[in-house]
Image (spheres, helix red, strand yellow):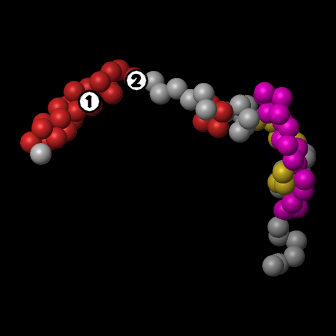
Amino acid sequence: MKTGIHPEYVETTVHCGCGNTFTTRSTKQSGQIVVEVCSQCHPFYTGKQKILDSGGRVARFEKRYGKRNAKAAADN
């Protein structure tokens, strides 16, 4: 590696809006990063994820393709 061209890689503390903190490494010189969500509070990781049916798209999909699958199963 060339000397003098790479940023310094320092320990950094990450502070989440939920109150969780953890340490990682980063090139950010301040040594602190503030985030809104982390793995402790993000719905995907906590299992509290909701699937929203926006505009009835799921119902429309089931209406279109559900009948084909039922018809194909009846033929077999």
Asked if residue 20 lies in the magenta stretch, the reply is yes
Furthest toward the left, the residue is: 75
Q: Earlier in the sequence, mark 1 or mark 2?
A: 2
Residue drawn at x 29%, y 24% is 59
Asked if residue 1 lies in the magenta stretch, the reply is no
User: Can see residue 22?
Assistant: yes
34 and 59: which one is in front? 59
Residue 2 is drawn in which quadrant? bottom right
Residue 72 is drawn in which quadrant? top left
User: Can see residue 68?
Assistant: no
Where does residue 17 sit, x and y in percent of width and height?
78, 28
Where does residue 28 sit, x and y in percent of width and height?
84, 50
Residue identifier under label 1: 62
Task: Mark 1 and mark 2 in contact? Answer it, CB < 8 Å.
Answer: no
- The stretch in magenta equals 7-23
Q: What element carries label 1?
A: helix
Looking at the rendered structure, the kind of residue marked 2 is: Asp
Label 1 and label 2: CA atoms lie apart by: 12 Å
Residue identifier under label 2: 53
